Image (cartoon, helix red, strand yellow):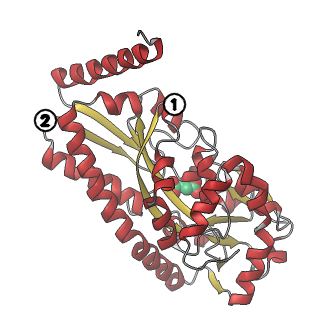
């Protein structure tokens, strides 16, 4: 029986394939890979590794252009540019998909994951894999997760207890969960694109931020933040995404090779990210520009208790099944 939805999908795919095939007839398929961080970070290195491997294995068939540091698109417009096929690969942090799916907000919940290994386990299990497909109805396909690392809190004053953050304004990514997280400790927030973070901190527009070590170091945030508390309170990871119509329109053999390259690059990025963050942590300490505040177990527990109510607040939007799946793979089983 004629199924109009299927017919439309088949037509769309055929149309997309035609587009990619035409591109190939006209020359190599062009993949523009845009991102907002520096080349030296885990994501920056992953993008360059992807380009290098494609050049080695798909020369003449696929060409990759990498645009770091928001030089092509920034946080405000990169996902729309992807959906319009103006750029073909991005790796936004997971907080930045809020507009397209609420399920990925699970990654923003404070103190949900004990460490990056717990995050890794969740991403590999079936619920984590399912989330890669959670935006396909909006023409966004998730190809892989890439790690950056756990976030630390930086500020103009020493943050040892949650009460120390009271009254400060923190720069956050565009995420309702992160807004609520800071609300729990009496702090206000400003949602700003990553490219504006250094200036906002330097000028005093905001007094604090949360970032993994590699983003702090590569953006020189430690030079304008006299204190960094090692809270490891949340994760900043990425989803490598493409435009679904573009991606499924790539001729099969080429797409299979691209996916093999992505697997290899993702493995390398995820293996190296933690060491890269620890090296940047040490560089920050060695710079003497910012004082590192390490928390005792009791002090960290106080932060956890203060922020933990956010889970309940977002449980119905994220889905209790998603949160439970994340809790299940956490090493230290708590409540
Ligand atoms: C990034 O690592 O891509 C930027 C994250 C942020 O906006 O804080």
Q: In this view, does 33 lie to the left or right of 289?
A: left
Marks 1 and 2 close (CB-CB < 8 Å): no
As helix, strand or loop, the secondary structure at mark 1 comes to helix
Q: Residue at the location (59% across, 58% down)?
A: 107
CA gap between label 1 and label 2 equals 32 Å
Residue 159 against residue 309 in the figure, above or below: below
Residue 269 against residue 11 in the figure, above or below: below
261, 54: nearer the viewer: 261
Quadrant holding ligand 1? bottom right
Residue 77 against residue 144 in the figure, above or below: above
Q: Residue at the location (64% across, 45% down)?
A: 102
Quarter of the image that includes the N terminus = top left
Report whether residue 27 is seen: yes
Crowding near the residue tagged with mark 2, few <14, some 14–19, many ≥20 C-alpha atoms within 10 Å:
few
Image coords of residue 297 (percent x, y): 68, 89
Quarter of the image that includes the C terminus = bottom right
Q: Is residue 3 left or right of residue 165?
A: left
Image coords of residue 203 (percent x, y): 71, 59
Q: Is residue 139 left or right of residue 235?
A: left
Image coords of residue 157 (percent x, y): 76, 76
- CB at disc 2 and ligand 1 closer than 8 Å: no
As helix, strand or loop, the secondary structure at mark 2 comes to loop
Image coords of residue 239 (percent x, y): 46, 50
Q: Residue at the location (24% across, 31% down)?
A: 29
228, 143: nearer the viewer: 143
Q: Mark 2 points at which residue?
A: 60
Crowding near the residue tagged with mark 1, few <14, some 14–19, many ≥20 C-alpha atoms within 10 Å:
few
**How many numbered markers are drawn?**
2
Which one is earlier in the sequence, the residue at label 1 or at label 2? 2
Report whether residue 197 is seen: no
Q: Name the residue under label 1.
A: 137
């Amino acid at each position: 029986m004629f199924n109009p939805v299927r017919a439309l999908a088949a037509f769309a795919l055929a149309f997309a394939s035609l587009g990619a095939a035409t591109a190939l007839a006209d020359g190599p398929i062009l993949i523009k890979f845009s991102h907002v961080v520096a080349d030296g970070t885990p994501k920056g290195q992953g993008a360059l590794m992807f380009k290098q491997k494609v050049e080695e294995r798909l020369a003449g068939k696929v060409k990759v252009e990498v645009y770091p540091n928001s030089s092509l698109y920034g946080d405000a417009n990169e996902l729309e540019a992807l959906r319009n096929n103006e750029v073909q690969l991005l790796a936004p942090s997971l907080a930045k998909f809020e507009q397209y799916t609420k399920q990925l907000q699970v990654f923003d919940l404070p103190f949900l994951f004990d460490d990056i290994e717990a995050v890794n386990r969740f991403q590999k299990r079936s619920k984590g894999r399912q989330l890669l497909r959670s935006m396909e109805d909006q023409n966004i396909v998730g190809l892989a997760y890439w790690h950056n690392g756990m976030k630390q809190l930086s500020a103009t004053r020493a943050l040892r207890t949650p009460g120390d953050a009271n009254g400060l304004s923190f720069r956050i990514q565009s995420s309702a969960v992160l807004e609520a997280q800071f609300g729990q400790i009496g702090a206000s927030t400003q949602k700003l694109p990553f490219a504006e973070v250094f200036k906002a901190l330097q000028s005093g527009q905001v007094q604090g931020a949360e970032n993994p070590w590699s983003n702090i170091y590569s953006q020189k945030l430690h030079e304008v933040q006299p204190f960094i508390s090692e809270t490891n309170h949340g994760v900043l990871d990425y989803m490598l995404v493409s435009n679904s119509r573009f991606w499924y329109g790539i001729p099969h053999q080429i797409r299979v090779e691209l996916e093999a390259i992505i697997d290899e690059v993702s493995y390398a990025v995820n293996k190296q990210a933690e060491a890269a963050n620890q090296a940047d942590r040490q560089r920050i300490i060695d710079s003497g520009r910012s004082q590192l505040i390490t928390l005792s177990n009791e002090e960290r527990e106080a932060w956890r208790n203060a922020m933990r109510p956010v889970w309940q607040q977002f449980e119905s939007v994220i889905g209790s099944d998603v949160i439970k799946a994340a809790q299940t793979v956490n090493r230290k089983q708590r409540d």
